[in-house]
Amino acid sequence: MTGVHARASRLLPESPAPERLEQHVAAFGPRPEPRTALIGELERSGLTGRGGAGFSAATKWRAVAAEAAGARAAVVVADAVETEPASLKDRTLLALRPHLVLDGLQLAAEAVGATRMVVYLSRANDALVRTVTAAIDKRTRSGRDGTDIEVRTAPTRYVAGEETAVVNRLNGRPARPRAVPPRPYSAGIDGRPTLLHNVETLAHVALIARRGADWFREAGTPGSPGTALVTITGAVRTPGVREVEFGETVGHIIDRAGGAAAEPAAILLGGYFGRWVQADRVWPVPYERDALRRVHGSLGAGVIAVLPRTACGVAESDRVLAFLARESAGQCGPCQFGLPAMSEALHTVATGRARPHTLSTLARWSQEIPGRGACRHPDGASLFVASALEVFAEDLARHVRDGACRASRRPPILPTPVLPGGWR
């Protein structure tokens, strides 16, 4: 391990204001010239995607570049929709350092042979759309980018940021996920090879292109190099977005957010497609993929949400599952019938109306639903439920036996918004 204490932030500026192009160039220098060796440098860096899947960036680039070597020029998309309600990291980065992301987008386009670049944003965030549009206009007037960068918006739906949903939306269809293959790297937007990256990933690309793989690996661990942006929320004294070094413990990261505001009972790692883990079990665990996996946690969307003992984990899980059930694309049996049924069953537990067999039914459904959907939405929801059944087992049993607890009537810790309908 190269270090477990946070270094100075690589991605976030000191000032909480959008960085102008002149400030960006002063901080980082001009965008590097196109480098044919950039894909190799990414491979040496070990950079993985920061959008949730954690896939090798270099592998994705090579696949797209190979497909684009023929007559079909590629498309590169910076995905900033960030539909995870508990996450703020992507919109924070893009709002404060738009030019670092746009540098990464341009470098990716040059490396894989793309002639079209798109920044994909939620239409609900008007301020961010204006910030990004202004940054692109400034770059265009300065002659910094040779190819225009488009700004396109997505409907405010949970699955609208999934890669095949992005492709559908940018192809003029509803922003619902579709079955694969073909995958976007071979036939995506306009049938062309398409590289989709989370905006944080592209910001790391812009830094690696300037400073190299060895510099990138100075932070983090050999297996999980670099840093990551994390949204720390729930019962913490100073919630918000922080840049952490892989290898810092979960407890240390929470301490950097002012510490827990009340005695923690459980931590939700990764967001609503992540998993609950008992607080004392995960507190000393390094924040990196393999270590978290050993305690049934995940990096996911970069969320660490602290649930205090004064809250009800059953009620929190009930609200999250209800959100996931109503946010499905409704394209398959598991989403049309499975998730609503599972949500209704958990709701009877949360409200003290469950039958004795309800918990065993939920456990069985959480094992049967994954792998059967048209996309991974039912898989993520089922994993979330399975973790709740494990971590809150005693609370669930008490709800079934004695009825809803007093804590279940307290205000929610986690946001579960009712999103506007529509997929276009």
Image (tube, rainbow, N blue to C red):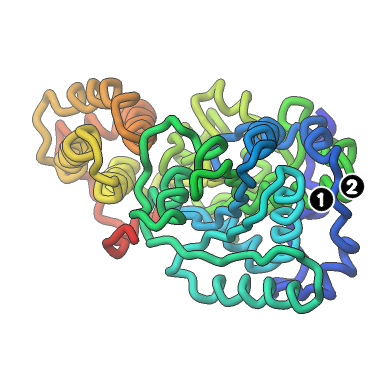
Residue at point 48%, 44% (across, down): 163
Q: Quadrant of residue 357?
A: top left
Labels 1 & 2 near each other (Cβ < 8 A): yes
Relative depth, front residue between 164 and 122: 164
Q: Residues within 10 Å of mark 2 (few under 14, many from 20)?
A: few
- Taking the image as shown, residue 329 lies to the left or right of residue 344, namely right
Looking at the image, which residue sits at the far front? 71
Residue at point 63%, 34% (across, down): 67
Residue named by callout 2 = 211
Q: Amino acid at mark 2?
A: Arg
- Taking the image as shown, residue 188 lies to the left or right of residue 339, namely right
Number of numbered markers: 2
Residue at point 56%, 50% (across, down): 260
* Relative image position of residue 276 (x, y in whole percent): 43, 35
Residue named by callout 1 = 207
- Taking the image as shown, residue 61 lies to the left or right of residue 27, namely left
* Relative image position of residue 222 (x, y in whole percent): 78, 26
* Relative image position of residue 8 (x, y in whole percent): 82, 53
Relative depth, front residue between 108 and 417: 108
- Taking the image as shown, residue 104 lies to the left or right of residue 184, namely right
Relative depth, front residue between 8 and 115: 115
Q: Quadrant of residue 382?
A: top left
Q: Can you say which quadrant of the picture contains the C terminus?
A: bottom left
Is residue 380 visible in the rendered image? The answer is yes
